[in-house]
Amino acid sequence: MKINKLSISNFLTIGRADIELDDRGLLLIQGVNDDDPSAESNGAGKSSVVDALCWGIYGTTARGVSGDAVVNKTTKKDCCVHITMTDCNQQYRIVRWRKGTNHKNSVSVYEKDLTTGAEMDLSKGTDRETQEVIGKVMGCSLDVFMAAVYAGQERMPDLPGMTDKMLKTLIEEAAGVEVLTEAYATVRDRYNRQKSIVDALAATQTTAIGNGARLSNEVAQLEVNSEDFEKGRRDRAKAELAKTIPINDEISRATTALKTWDEAASRVDLDKIDAKLKAHKTEEAERNRLDTIVRALDMQVASAKSAVALKKRETDAAEASLKSIEEQIGKPCGECGKVYCEHDMEAARKARQETIAELKKTLLTAASEAKALVARANEAQESAVKFKAGMTDVTAVALRQRELSNLLNSIDASKRMIESKRKDIENIKAVANAKLTETNPWTKAVESKRQEIRHNDATLSEMSERIGKAGEELELLADAVKVFGPAGVRAHILDTVTPYLNDRTRDYLGALADGNIHATWTTLAKTAKGELKEKFNIGVTNDKGAESFAGLSGGEKRKVRLATAMALQDMVASRAIKPIDIFVADEVDHALDEAGLERLMGILDRKARERGTVLVISHNSLSDWIDSVITVTKAAGLATVSGAVARGF
């Protein structure tokens, strides 16, 4: 991966700068601080150049500055870093804004095919997603970028001071084995999922085995029940036939009783009695007729006597009225006061007398008719009494008729009972016969359970086959987990990386420290018991002093950090899918004597020839070793960049 060009606007101290970075060899960045010429560390903004490179790619500087803090304090807006890179035939552009007037806070990434000239926007919906795309383009994380590309007085990677986990993670990613880490995570997840499948299949198989045992027991019990049912057919039929015994006893008793009764003679006697009673009914009809005549005549006599009495009362009333007329003579009229005389009453007296005569005549007629009716009634009564006295007495015959009727009814009832009981016996025999041939109720249950067993056996067979195939896949995945796991290919790669790192570190330390300081990358360490265990660390010793990194002086520590950082950068360049052809040495010459500085410049010159570009940031004059110089000049809060900013300057 070649970083071609870096464009900076309003970033930290820098107002505007455009710098070409590919194949520049040794490129010195110096600074002039016109705002504070007395500043010991200058403060012009030299480190802002490489900070812009780091911020443009990852959104944070090598010194951990991010957010609005990267915006120039003078302009206070429109902070932007534009980086152009090439990887084989693909060109990438990363543009990152902070407090942009039009772009706000955003980041974009573009891909251009150098063979066709077609450019495509790779930016996503969110800056976080776009940053993930940039990470894939770079092929490394921020930590690896800083460890492999950046060596600085402030942010020098403290590789010897890192923990086992931190150093191992960094080396794994730098060595390009993060793909194996991802593969390990992927295959481990697949292994766990497959194991879950195998476990589920095994659980299903265990359940099926249990079901098979249960079903076998159930079938055995059902078959016993079925066999018992078959054996009990005759017993059940006999038990049913036993119900006929009391019924036969009832029939026998009823039949015996029937034999004691002379049904035919009783019916003959009853017929004779019925004939007598039929004749007696003719006499009763005559008696009833005579009684009806007597009652009718009695009613007529009563009616005639009432008529005579009524006429008698009318006659008496008429005679009383005549008498009252006679008594009115000599008395005054109630209306006019005139006194009645005998002459005045004559007409009334005559009318009353005529009425009385007519009433008496009618009374005599009614009395004569009543007398005749009484005579007829007496005659009819005598005839009725005489007829009744001559009627036949059938009381004993009627009693005998009831006795014979009851007897014959009992005989008929006994016959019906016998017939009904015989039908009951036939029904019982039919039921008993049916019990000999009835369907075995357990047969269907047995067949159903056997069907379940066949289905369960098929399930077991299927489970066995599936478990076999799943188990084979699980074994393959288990092997893959071992291969991609920490103890597999990754460990092998780290073991092959370690000699390379030791060789490069020894080379750099030999030049920087005259061979007195030794830094050894190891993957094993001794425990307190003297046992070896896996542990990734850098062991440091000094032939003339300390036996550990912690015991070194500050200058010695910087030499070790620089040597290990450059060794790591060489390893990344030799193994990474996308090695970054740039190295940043930020004030690494600090506190070096003349001989040490000469050896350092030799190392940096060699690295520049190998990798293309080495940016050397220093506030010391290094013009004796570096021809190409970029000067960062700060004035009124803004820094400008001049000098060898372009190739061929």
Image: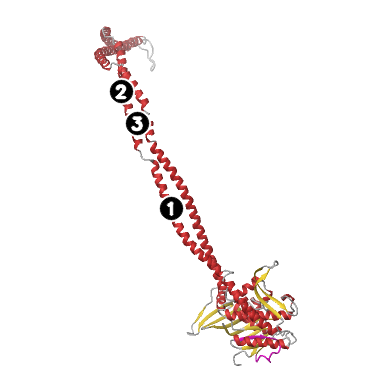
| Residue in the foreground of this view, choosing between 63 and 203 | 203
Quarter of image, res 10: bottom right
Q: Which residues are magenta?
A: 612-628
Classed neighbour count for the residue bearing mark 3: other residues with Cα under 10 Å, few (<14), some (14–19), many (≥20): some
Query: Is residue 138 highlighted in magenta?
Result: no
**Considering only vertical position in the picture, is 229 above or below 628?**
above
| Residue in the foreground of this view, choosing between 624 and 235 | 235
For disc 3, the marked residue is 428
Sooner in the amino-acid sequence: mark 3 or mark 2: 2
Give, as a three-letter code, the residue at label 3: Ile
Tell me the colour scheme of the image. secondary structure
The N terminus: image quadrant: bottom right
For disc 2, the marked residue is 415
User: Which residue lies at the image location 41% right of the left edge and 45% below the top edge?
Assistant: 446
State the image coordinates of residue 609 (x, y, percent, origin top left). Answer: 61, 88
Give, as a three-letter code, the residue at label 2: Lys
Classed neighbour count for the residue bearing mark 2: other residues with Cα under 10 Å, few (<14), some (14–19), many (≥20): some
The CA distance from mark 3 to mark 2 is: 20 Å
Q: Is 399 left or right of 209, judged from the image as shown?
A: left
Mark 1 falls on what kind of element?
helix
Quarter of image, res 277: top left
Mark 2 falls on what kind of element?
helix
Query: Is residue 618 highlighted in magenta?
Result: yes
In this view, the mark in front (1 or 2): 1
The CA distance from mark 1 to mark 3 is: 46 Å
For disc 1, the marked residue is 457
Quarter of image, res 521: bottom right
